[in-house]
Image (tube, grey):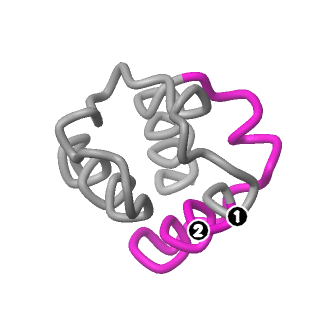
Amino acid sequence: MNIQDFIDNFANQFDDTDKAVFTSETNFKQLDEWSSLTALSIIAMVDDEYNVIIKGSDIINSETIQDLFEIVVKKVRK
């Protein structure tokens, strides 16, 4: 698993946001398109792509895509 693949998968959950906006340091909750529905899409994407279950609290506790990526990596290694 690498950060760029994670960013690409993350960005694919957004319909109207330019893919160039997404970097490891993107504060995703400040994006105009961010919503609770997007959060659910991210949770489903992580489950489908990485076979990892994340919770709403994992998203709440993350500010950037990098923060969320690190949570997923830790859960993969368990």
Q: Residues within 10 Å of mark 2 (few under 14, many from 20)?
A: some
Q: Main secondary structure of the magenta part?
A: helix
Residue drawn 39% across the image and 74% down it: 49
Residue 28, percent from left and from top: 51, 33
Figure check: 60 above or below 56: above
Left/right of residue 41 with respect to residue 4 in the rendered view:
right
Residue drawn 29% across the image and 36% down it: 22
Q: Are marks 2 and 1 in contact (CB under 8 Å)?
A: yes
Residue 70, percent from left and from top: 47, 34
Q: Residues within 10 Å of mark 1 (few under 14, many from 20)?
A: few
Residue drawn 35% across the image and 47% down it: 17
Disc 2 residue type? Ser
Disc 1 residue type? Leu
Residue 8, percent from left and from top: 24, 54
The residue under label 1 is 37
**Secondary element type, mark 1:** helix
Between the C-alphas of marks 2 and 1, the distance is 6 Å
Figure check: 78 above or below 49: above
The residue under label 2 is 41
**Secondary element type, mark 2:** helix
Figure check: 28 above or below 48: above
Residue 9, percent from left and from top: 32, 61
Left/right of residue 19 with respect to residue 32 in the rendered view:
left
Asked if the magenta segment contains residue 76, the reply would be no
Left/right of residue 11 with respect to residue 13 in the rendered view:
left
The part of the chain drawn in magenta is 40-63
